[in-house]
Image (tube, rainbow, N blue to C red):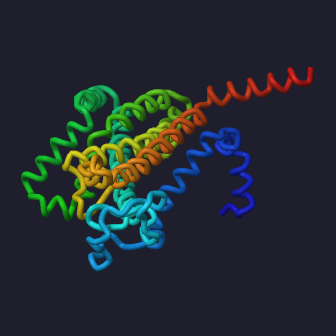
Amino acid sequence: MLSARTWRQQVRNSRLWYRLRRDRVAQCALLLVVVLVGAALLAPWLAPSNPYDLAQINLLDSELPPFWVAGSVSAHPLGTDVQGRDLLSIIVYGARVSLAIGFGAVLLQAFVGISLGLLAGYRGGRVDALLMRLADIQLSFSTLMMAILVSALVKAAFGGAFYGNYGVIVLIFIIGLSEWPQYARTVRASVLGEKRKEYVEAARVLGFSGPRIVLRHILPNALSSSLVISTLQIGNAIMAEAALSFLGLGMPETEPSLGSLIKAGFDYLQSGAWWITLLPGLYLVGLIVSMNLLGDWLRDTLNPRFYDAIASNAAGSRQRRRR
């Protein structure tokens, strides 16, 4: 087991740390992700009140403005919504729901996509052709369109009460099963390149089984691209949930997410209570933009050619300065 000192030395000598120290945009994006996700995880301790506790809600405090607008109340720094709920509290609690759906959907689509991509790339032949045609059919449909169709069918078949109780699980399956081809096609391409290399041929000669070769030798070399996709897909999954909630097919207003909060305040946007929609929207935009920036940074950092080009440019610059 590595000691803490050895682990810190490995982190400092890693390519990720080297690139992170020199990229201000990535540092700001990482800081924003840590702040926004941390606020959601620490919602029970950071929120002024519990939006699910009806005893803490007062209708007389409805539509109070945030602290920089006249008429605000110190107990509600970001104001309140039309039901009198503290807006800061429902934003951080709603972000927990959106993040749970986003991470759950990405884990599901990664598991399905990576499994099918490994199977298609390693087996080849008819299995590869069948799975890739299924992926092509899936990609021909919009993710949002598929999610709208499936969520509407679930509501019609099981009723609104069922959807209200199991909405998070339903949305995880809907969004997760709509995006697996992204992983499958990327992992398949990696497997096709890896399975012809010498170490795979050596494993076959030694008599290793196919699943062992795939899981212990090929899969680790295909995970870097999947990591980049996951960073980008978390933002896409959160945005898909927000879009479905805004259309009335996502989370109900009794269990708020960022999308349902934006929808709940949209009707009052013209009446002057703009903060009910604007502040959750800013939280959502900041979360998605920062995650996408981190995904772009990871893609560039984990690309060996891009890293080698940066290193050669830096070496050339040092040589020119010495001259």
Number of numbered labels in the structure image = 0
- Does residue 50 appear to the left or right of 313 in the view shown? left
Query: On the rendered image, what quadrant is the N terminus found in?
Result: bottom right
Residue 31: image location, x then y, percent = 58, 51
Residue visible at 39% across and 57% down? 95
Residue 112: image location, x then y, percent = 32, 44
Q: Residue furthest right?
A: 323
Q: Which of 145/113 is in front? A: 145
Please determine whether, in this image, residue 161 is positioned above or below residue 285.
below
Q: Which of 84/312 is in front? A: 84
| Residue 207 in sight from this viewpoint | no
Please determine whether, in this image, residue 144 is positioned above or below residue 242.
above
Query: On the rendered image, what quadrant is the C terminus found in?
Result: top right
Q: Residue furthest front?
A: 70
Residue visible at 70% across and 63% down? 4
Residue 158 figure quarter: bottom left
Please determine whether, in this image, residue 126 is positioned above or below residue 167.
above
| Residue 41 in sight from this viewpoint | yes
Q: Which of 12/163 is in front? A: 163
- Does residue 185 appear to the left or right of 306 in the view shown? left
Residue 301: image location, x then y, percent = 60, 36
Please determine whether, in this image, residue 134 is positioned above or below residue 233.
above
Residue visible at 62% across and 45% down? 27
Residue visible at 68% across and 45% down? 17
Residue 140 figure quarter: top left
Q: Which of 126/59 is in front? A: 59
Q: Residue furthest left?
A: 157
Residue 262: image location, x then y, percent = 31, 51
